[in-house]
Image (cartoon, rainbow, N blue to C red):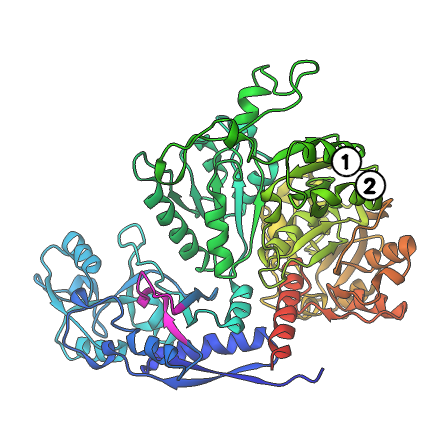
Amino acid sequence: MKKSLITFKAGTRSSKLALIQAKTSLDKIAKTIDGISFELIKVNTTGDDDQKLDLKESPENFFTEQLDKALVNRTIDCAIHSAKDLPNNYTDEIDFFWLPWNEQTNDVIILPKKTTLEQLPKYPIAGISSERREEYCKEFFPTAIIKKIRGNIDDRLKQLDNGEYDFIILAAAGLNRLNISDRISQIIPLSQLKPPDGQGFIALTFRKGDERFYRIRSLFTPSVTFAGAGVGDKNLCTKATIDALRDCEICLYDSLMDHKLLEELPSTAELIDVGKRCGAHSKQQQVITDLLCERARRGKKVVRLKGGDPGIFGRLTEETTALEELQIAYRVIPGISALQAATTGTGMLLTRRDVSRGFVALTPRAAAGKLAPCDANEKATLPIVYYMSIKAMDHITKELLNDGYPKNTPVAVIYNAGGLDQEIFRTELSDLPKLGKNYCSSNPGLIIIGNVTSYEYNEKLGALKGNKILLTCSETLQSKACNEVYRYGGKPIPLPLIKLTLNDEFYEDLSTFSWIIISSPSSAKAFIDFINVKGVDRRTIPSIMTCGKETSNELKKVNIHVDAEPEKNFSAKELIKLAHSLLSKNDNVLRLRSDKAGPALAKELLETGAKVTDSIIYKNSQIFHEILPEFDIVFFSSSSTVENFIEQWGIDPLKNKILLSIGQPTAKTLFKYKLRPTLIADESTVKGAMGSLASFIVAQDLLSTT
């Protein structure tokens, strides 16, 4: 397929700041998605034309109304805004999302040139444009005379320098984007003046239903996680939910759960209590759903933490359906429900040999809090779940048909529920025996009878559209890789092919070196293990240079200082460039690597003139697996993973699959076996690789529609 360039018309306000931030943002989007570009269209808004109205009295759409109309009228395809200018509620015609590139969110004080705060008069005139800034002035400048100020940043600075004001308060973001941050006299701490939601961020709006922008948004809107909190006790929460909370930026949580779980959230996470309150459940649920969708479109990692198990009386459908309508990806982590805690946890077992072979679970509550019948007729409409029943399909079918169940009653058979090799087969009751004969497996399975089997989660959302990504990286990288796949709406298939172990023969006196070069997260973890096992005095650790942020972060987790890393394009090539700028012939350098990495990097480091010791700190051994799971895309994180895959399964399973290589060395290994990598990560990290994959999939989809 020949690529064709797509050019979108993007509207923006006509101010200098608006044009700069729009062009910068759109250039980044175009760079992320190969084959698209943007044409900027200037649009004057009411807020630009009306310079007299006090912003405290202005309507919500003061700076967006004309851009919204241009969208609806199809004059433009999208519009770029300062996120804080968006109205709280959009119509059914317009959708939005925030872009991930943000500026400083603080407000700042600006004084006339060559003036200090100490030189302010006793009753200074303060240029203020919002109620929150006015409240700040009243507290910290109680003698100030509050005076309205309007205009773009250049206009406001001109009014200040002309003596109309003694100081003004602006957002740091605008000054930074205009490259005039030297005008900042004092940064106001966030604890003193909380910024409005969206300050420092850029938002993109588009017509609701425009599939092209749903695909673009999927790159910048992480998958939402619905997680079961368990019941009553933090210890009854799954590890998967704990991991999701630790990686969360916004958490919407219920009341009926152990609130100690919230301690697992990062200190910077936004916590929102959405626990239902008695007497207003229906209204409250819509508020929760709207809030969830709004937060999801801010480009943050959102966890919806539900008490018990999200799917058991948890109103999960309302929330997932709303996300599906917006084509925002999500995943669901089951949890331990009150049902299990009240029965298995107390001895009142719902299944006990010769006492009970099953149970009914239902609620007397209907819509709007009304009571619904729980009689025999109602129970007869409930779904039935059969355990340990795979070889009894004929018997089950005959019984149900004799009981009056229609032949076309929906049925589902689930093998290995929750496992990587989970399989689901759907059919009708009359065909259930045939399904058993054709697909009957020795694997454990459940049979579910009833209309509920007609439903399923929409897993084809997000940039990766539910594709199964085979992750061959070591155990040390699996968690990070899975999180990145989930972020873009893919399904991770963890299959580590290499195991990393500390080299018992490694020992170096660190005090004899001036630099340590660490070029991978695995080497960093091995270095940490070495320090802990050998009881190394941290004061003897020399300066450390790494290949990038992922490697540095492993060290920073245990408070080991990193002295140098490339600013971008994290790779061995960038590391060599950095080494040439920092090393000299007087330096004694220790390069740490695996037994598979080879001495090439150490040889290049010698060209700096430094003395280089090339040491193997960990060994790389192969992991064997009995079964190769189904997959659509395979991620090779090193040459070793390529070698190990081919040794176990050959090259045939890789044909007609997307092959993702973390970097050039891994790609060369694929070429050695006459396999062409579909793409090579722009940045040689797990995060960079998954970002490149997501951009590739989205670009292919966009270009295929032209």
Can you give x and y, in whole percent of width and height, for residue 679 in the image? 73, 70
Crowdedness near tag 2: few (<14), some (14–19) or many (≥20) residues, C-alpha within 10 Å: some
Q: Quadrant of the N terminus?
A: bottom right
State the SS at label 2. loop
Q: Give the residue at x 35% y 78%.
A: 18
Q: Quadrant of the C terminus?
A: bottom right
As for residue 87 lying within the magenta part, the answer is yes
Nearer to me, 258 or 663: 258
Report the residue marked by disc 1.
393
As for residue 124 lying within the magenta part, the answer is no
First to last magenta residue range: 79-94
Q: Give the residue at x 61% y 65%.
A: 566
Q: Give the residue at x 65% y 38%.
A: 449
Is residue 157 something that shows in the picture?
no
Q: Amino acid at mark 2?
A: Cys
Left or right of 642 on screen, residue 40: left
Report the residue marked by disc 2.
440
Rounded to the nearest angstrom, the CA distance separating label 2 from label 1 is 10 Å
Relative to 106, is 152 above or below?
A: below
Relative to 48, is 245 above or below?
A: above
